[in-house]
Each structure stands twice: as structure tokens, then as C-alpha cells.
Amino acid sequence: MGQKRSIFEEVNEHTPQKVVQTGGVIDRGTEGARRGIRIWLMALFLLVVLMITVGGLTRLTDSGLSITEWRPITGALPPMSEADWQSEFNKYQEIDQWQIENQWMELPDFKIIYWWEWGHRQLGRLIGMVWALGFLGFLVARQVPKGWTGRLVLIGALGGVQGAVGWWMVSSGVTPGKGITSVASYRLATHLGMAFVILGFIAWYVLLLGRRERDLMQARRNRDSKLYSMSTGLLHVTFIQILLGALVAGIDAGRSYTDWPLMGGQIFPPDAFIIEPMWKNFFENPGLVQFVHRGWGYLLLIFAAVVWRRGLVSANSFTRFAFNTVAVAITLQVMIGVATVLYAAPVEIAIVHQLLAVFVWVLILRAKFLSHYPITTFISKG
């Protein structure tokens, strides 16, 4: 047995010490589950990012209306014969998009856009299956940490709602005889907005599961409430900009004015309120929709600079670095946005613009998380 020490005895800095960290009651029995669930959620995260990318390319290639029916079960199988293909093509020929814009198409051309939309829907089914199998697996094995069942159910529920919203969006463009050749832009914005909400929840849960409950509780004592509030505001402003971008994409407003910083040689676009009733111009007038998207982007850039300056005075180096990356990403996104306008929104630049929005969204979430749960850094004396 070692020699007893006084509790007031000074320990020499050269005395070897071995520190063993043991999990507390909060973490006991859940560490393995937390790691496994985190990996599963990261896989879902990547699938949702891929879904957003494929969805953007489906829109940019005007493929979204090629499948005119919503068949959640039987629609998983593509046409298996030439007769089946012809049947699908006949259905497409009944809608306005073919009647007005695509009468030049023959069956081989139709197959190209059909595969884009079919792949998009298949990816949605895959995400649903990955969520269901993972959730049921952890549930049956009783490996879901306390308090996490509702959170994981929420992701699945939002995914189901997203599927219904997707068809609600597509159904707005497959009506014949109404002169409609694309989906309603506000429904497209709702669909994209839902995707970012789902992505946000998954990202936040991944961040939470990356640290022990005990560590999170201790970190929260050092949170920067002001910075957390400002980053929350930045997240909301960014979300509105994402929705405005979807409105631009829904009516191809990005190709209406290709000069910058002016629009048609003017600060305010001409004929901004020619549609009656007036409120429809904010959804259907390409010039006004692009103007609002540009203007909100400038406001976002200014607010991001304010939040970044506040983040620089954080006492935690990880938090400062997180807000630095947000500032760089938003600045780059504005530059890509300008390039998208100047080159009339080609597919290559437009999809980069959309993907970068995903990175901006996640980086803001991470900065917000670190302002609420800062990682304490220690400076050791040499």
C-alpha cells in the first residue's frame, strides 16, 4: 500500500501521474449505441446531400415531369418492355410540357429525362429504407440512448412528409390544358426547404452524438448566448435565401437578367409589377424574383460579416475557426451566385451554387453548435 499523503500536500510537477477517465452514469451503457447511431445518421446525411444534388440536376434538365403518376410501391420498377415505355411516353405526351415545349421529343429522348426522375424517386425510397432498417435495428436491439427515440422518429416522419410534398410539387406541373410547363415555384421552394430542414436535424444530431452527454452538459456552462443567438439569426436569414433561390430556379429567373450589379442597365428591373394581381409578381415575375434574391443575398453577406466579427472575439479557438469558415463559404457562395447570373445559369455552375448552399447551411449549424457547446482548449506552460 502506498504512503498516505496529506490533502494539502503539494505535488511536484515531476511526479508521474496516470489519469484514467471513466464514463459517468449519464453515458453508461450508451457509448456503443451513440457511435453506431452517429455512423448511421452520417450515412443518411450523405444520402440526403446526394438527393438534393440529383434533385437539382433533375430540375436543371427539365426531367421532373417525365413521370406523371405517384406510385410509391409499383413505381419502384422502371418500364420493362417497349410497350411499357411507350405507355409512359403516351402519358407524358398528354401534359402541357410536351404539348408546348417538347413535341420534338421521340421515345429515346424521353427515356433520358425519365431515368433522371426515376433515379431521383429511387433515391428517396433508398433513404426511407435506410432510415427504417437502421431505426428498427437499433430499437429492437435496445440500443437507442435515452431521449433519442423521438428525435430519430422525427427524421423518418419528416422524410415521409417530404415524399408527399414531392408529389404535391410534381402534380402542379402534370395538368393538361392549362398552359403549365413546370412545377409551381412556391411548391419547389417548399420541397427544397424541407430537404434542408431534414439535413439540418441530421447534422445537429450527428454533432450531438459526437460528444458524450457529460461533456455536453459541462460545455453548455461556457456557452456564448449572444453568439448563439446571432448564429441562429444567420441560419434563419440563410434559410430564407435558400427558399428565394428555389423561387428563382422554379421559373428560370436566373436567366432573365445576365448583367451585374445592374439589371437591364437599371438598379431596379423594368416591368417588375406587370402581372395581376400584384402579389403574383413576387413568385412569377422573373425580374422581380431575381431582384429580391440578389437583394437578400447582399443583406445576408452584411449580416454574416457582423456575426463573423462577433465570432472573432470568442474565447474558444474552435468556435473562432468555425465562424471563419462560415464567412469564407458565404463569400464564395456570393461570388458563385454572381457567376451564375453572368453566365445565364448553366447547369455546371448552377449545381455548384446549390451544393455550396448545402455546405454554407451545415457550416452555420456547426458554428451555432460550437457557440452553444464550446470545446474548451487549455494552454499548457512550457
Image (cartoon, helix red, strand yellow):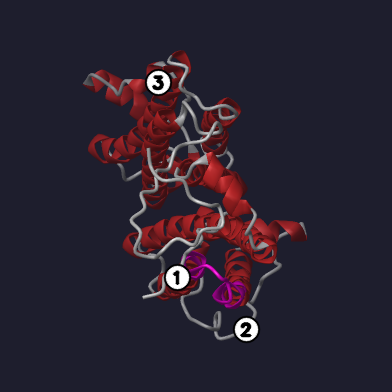
Q: Residues within 10 Å of mark 1 (few under 14, many from 20)?
A: few
**Nearest-to-viewer mark from 3 and 1:** 1
**Nearest-to-viewer mark from 1 and 2:** 1
The reply, left or right, for residue 18 in relation to residue 26 is left
Residue 204 on image: x %, y %: 52, 46
Picture layout, residue 201 above or below residue 244: above
Q: Residue at coordinates 42% horizontally, 70% vertically from top-left?
A: 380
Q: Earlier in the sequence, mark 3 or mark 2?
A: 3
Residue at image mark 3: 133
Residue 359 on image: x %, y %: 43, 58
Q: Are marks 3 and 1 in contact (CB under 8 Å)?
A: no
Task: Tell which of 358 and 288 is nearer to you.
Answer: 358
Residue 91 visible in the displayed image? no
Residue at image mark 1: 379
The reply, left or right, for residue 324 in relation to residue 149 is left
Q: Is residue 64 magenta?
A: no
Amino acid type indicated by mark 2: Ile
